[in-house]
Amino acid sequence: MIKSRSDSLISKFIKIIAILAMVYLTIILLFIVPRGFEQADNSHKELEQKLALSLSKSAAIAIYVNNSEIANEVIDALLLHEEIDAVKLASDDGVVFTSNALLFAQSSATENINRYRIYSPIDEQPIGELLIHNDDQVLQQKALSRVLYQVGFILAQFFFTVVVLVLVLKNIVGRPLTALSQALYSVTPGHSKIIPINKENEHNEIGVVVHSVNTFINNAHQAIERERELRGQIEHWEQYYRNMAEQDPLTGLKNRLGCEKYIEKASLTNQYIALLLVDLDGFKVVNDQFGHAAGDFTLEEVARRFSTLLKESNLAGVVGRIGGDEFVIYLALHDNAPEPLQSLAQKVVYSANLPIGYQSHSIQVGCSVGIAVHASQQLDIDKLILHADKAMYSVKQTHKNDFSFYQEIREKSSLL
């Protein structure tokens, strides 16, 4: 009789489990499967957008400077993901870098292409686009694998829970599981703090779970550290390429582009922008007499002197090199008083004329300085340079090793 009741209870339990399993499987098929495919698609889109965003600056640099090496690095980085089977980087000017030109040329491939606009690293204007072609077969396979994994995991979890509830006593499993859940709840992502294991559970299933969780925590911590290191490397290379675009490689001063960016920013908070255009006198003789190495040394020394003068003047500005022996000193001013400019120009001429020791030689150069001042509102940098250039050449035509204001040149011309 007891056996009969026992068999009856077991059969009822099995029937209930079977019914619940069928209902649960139906719910999975009707809800989880479509949602799983949707989540897989959304995850890929999010990953693709993040990849495009993280590589957009490098892509912008590649298009802006027309550098195939950087472009190929961007393309190769995207192709590391098997869901992506082709990448194209195209500028608005018609320059194209691609991993599979034939695929992009096919009209049927346009349905699987995602486009991302690329903006200039200088003025944030659109200069091209990044086209990514996805491999539908790989995406579907991954989505299916993900859904099957979720279904299998949920079913396994369901049956495991039922078996545990039936076979395991609460005082043997309940207490360790409660302690483990509390320990897991206290785990903070990004920290390497592990979960302690009681001696009584060190060699049983609870111990295995804790060991696995600790392994996961350690791996997650290492992954986060690697991600931080990678992010730091990306920031380092972004800064490196940015400096390459804005810095004179010989002297370390700003180049023309770097100076223009400084002026664009400084003109927003200052009323006047002044330019001291400096052209070295006698520099060609240095190259001819002592060689190009001596010429480079001279340019580096002059750049150092001019930078020191600007720093000691307490004037806001930047020193740059825009040509072979041409230097610029841009100043951001609140008024157009000539005295600070005159004082700095005198020091520039004086410092340029100081002898430069190179090996056993004493090198002597001079400089002619043209000064121009414009209001920062509606500033025309090309016009500012033109005015300073005229003032500088007026010095060269007279006696050199001196400076002149463009305003003075204009007044003298009006008197003639």
Image (spheres, grey):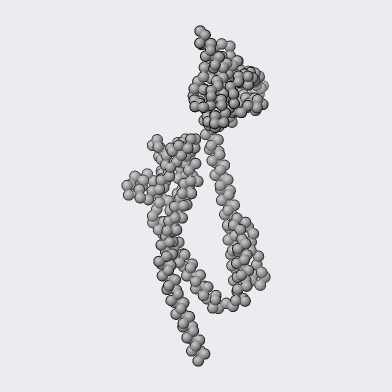
Outermost residue, left side: 107
Can residue 287 be seen here? The reply is: no
Residue 17 against residue 188 in the figure, above or below: below
Image position, residue 301 (x, y; %): 63, 25
Q: Of residues 69 and 371, which is closer to you in this image?
A: 371
Image position, residue 332 (x, y; %): 58, 27
Q: Residue at x 54, y 44 (%)?
A: 234
Residue 13 against residue 267 in the figure, above or below: below
Image position, residue 358 (x, y; %): 65, 23
Image position, residue 240 (x, y; %): 55, 38
Q: Quadrant of residue 348?
A: top right
Can residue 243 be seen here? The reply is: yes
Q: Residue at x 56, y 25 (%)?
A: 272
Q: Residue at x 61, y 60 (%)?
A: 187
Outermost residue, top side: 416
Q: Residue at x 61, y 67 (%)?
A: 180
Outermost residue, bottom side: 1
Q: How many marks?
A: 0
Q: Of residues 153 and 291, which is closer to you in this image?
A: 153
